[in-house]
Amino acid sequence: MAKKISIVVPIYNSAEFMQALLDAIDAQRKASEWDLELILVDDGSRDNSYAKIEELSKVYGYIKGVKLSKNFGHQIAVKTGLSCCTGDYIAIIDDDLQDPPSLLPGFFSYLDQGYDVAYGVRKKRKESFIKRLSYDTFYRILKSISDTHIPLDSGDFCVMTKRVVDNMLKFNEKNPFLRGIRAWVGFKQIGVVYERQARIQGESGYTLKKLLKIAMDGIFSFSTMPIRIITILGYFGLSIAVFYSIYIFIDKLLHGVPVKGFATLAILISLFSSLILICLGIIGEYVVRIYDEVRDRPYVIIEKTINV
């Protein structure tokens, strides 16, 4: 029996090139003879993206449109799209065609072979050196400290079976890190290497602030290492204090050197004050996330929908 396909695409300020996105998806739909539903989630765009979704939905009857009441962020937009899926196989792609729909049949073939998840592993990224270096560094830090095995260089681009998505949606976190949740739920997964394309048009909606937030969501949601670093810093500071005290005591006994005052005191106060602030910041990050959860606010507000 043919599988129903769901494709989730978060939309942000994409009105100018949304037609190109639909052309690529529809061409692959026809070539692969998909029974398709396409979920386009407008994440508080400042242009007329939702109006474009409404216009396209009149031409392509398989489109489902969702307009969020404001910009909630990429991960929330994707999670909202996943909650609207009814397909047997579910794919997540970006709106800029960096992960082109033409790759999906190859990814879906792994699900036909019995895998539950086939996720993209980026071989090359057509982005600036600084951005590539930042991504590489983040993934390797996360892998080394995470309590969950999160594959290197894997983004949100993937295909999954419905049971994986159903289990991912059981997570009610207000700051979800979806590729971490995808790894945590388990099932049979495989990484598929591919070369990521350049954006077809426009600039990425991922500002430095948004990238840092996703990085922090990944680290604080899937690692307890930051809180353990506080204990390590405490022992480090204690060691400095003990050894320096011994040094001063011996120097005083053997050489009669007077205890040095202001400069030493200023350095030690600056050092330990900085360590205290770092530790408070780490603790505060966990406390803020606990606070987000216990308030139990909805993670998203949907303003209106099409065909949902």
Image (cartoon, rainbow, N blue to C red):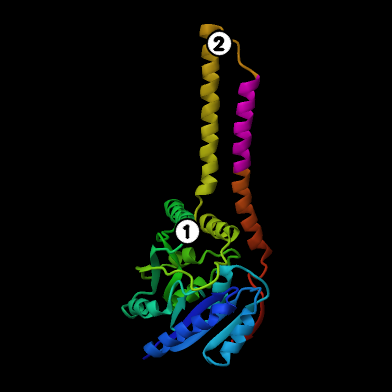
Q: Is residue 286 left or right of residue 142?
A: right
Compare residues 269 and 196 and report the one nearer the observer.
196
Q: Main secondary structure of the magenta part?
A: helix
Tag 2 residue: 252
Residue 128 is tagged as: 1
| Three-letter code, disc 1 | Ser
Identity of the residue drawn at 58% across and 73% down: 77
Q: Is residue 38 left or right of residue 281?
A: left
237 part of magenta stretch:
no
Q: How many marks?
A: 2
Compare residues 245 and 94 and report the one nearer the observer.
94
Q: Earlier in the sequence, mark 2 or mark 1?
A: 1
* Gap between marks 2 and 1 measured at Cα: 56 Å
Res 18 visible? yes
Q: Position of residue 78 (x, y in %)?
A: 54, 73
Identity of the residue drawn at 59% across and 79% down: 15
What span is in magenta? 262-278
Quadrant (top left, top right, bottom left, bottom right) of the C terminus: bottom right
| Three-letter code, disc 2 | Lys
- In the figure, 76 relative to 266: above or below? below
Identity of the residue drawn at 60% across and 14% down: 259
Identity of the residue drawn at 55% across and 75% down: 10
Quadrant (top left, top right, bottom left, bottom right) of the N terminus: bottom left
